[in-house]
Amino acid sequence: MQALLLSILGIGKVLWAFIIPLLAGHTAAILSGLLPIAIETVRDLNSSSVTSVEKRAAAAAKVKAIAEAEGIKAFESLINLSVELALQKLRAEEIKAVKPVEKVVEVKPEEKK
């Protein structure tokens, strides 16, 4: 399937093998710039009383504005990904902060023989 798609697009396998690591590295570089902004933004919006959909939209808009001000150019999908990754990071931190529930052991009465 990949070979067919590459032939339709007119991209050779050698060129594809060269481009993919560049794109992956570029995406990683952009995300490394967006994530600190997104984490701070999601933390700030976490306590607001709006719905989660509205929080995500507000976070994405704020991350985009801050990123553009800092000279980071990113597509909407990478901005949304950074917001989602920040949200998952904060949720994981909240789960770790909650004291684990002690395991309850059931004691069965002895059976009569």
Image (cartoon, rainbow, N blue to C red):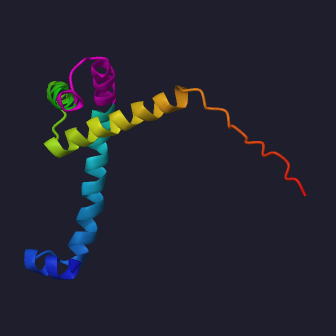
- The residue furthest front is 113
Residue extent of the magenta highlight:
36-55
| Main SS class of the magenta portion in the image | helix
On screen, residue 9 versus residue 108, left or right, reads left
Q: Residue at x 68, y 37 (%)?
A: 103
Q: Is residue 50 magenta?
A: yes
Q: Residue at x 21, y 40 (%)?
A: 80
In the image, 109 versus 10, the foreground residue is 109
Q: Is residue 21 magenta?
A: no
Q: Which image quarter holds the N terminus?
A: bottom left
Percent position of residue 4, x then y: 16, 82
Percent position of residue 110, x then y: 85, 48
On screen, residue 53 versus residue 105, left or right, reads left
- Determine which quarter of the picture holds residue 107: top right
Percent position of residue 14, x then y: 25, 75
- The residue furthest right is 113
Location of residue 52 with respect to 75 vertically, above or below: above
On screen, residue 65 versus residue 23, left or right, reads left
Percent position of residue 51, x then y: 21, 27
**Is any part of residue 75 visible from this angle?**
no
The number of callouts visible is: 0
Q: Which image quarter holds the C terminus?
A: bottom right
Location of residue 49 with respect to 38 vertically, above or below: above
Q: Residue at x 29, y 55 (%)?
A: 24
In the image, 49 versus 67, the foreground residue is 49
**Is any part of residue 30 visible from this angle?**
yes
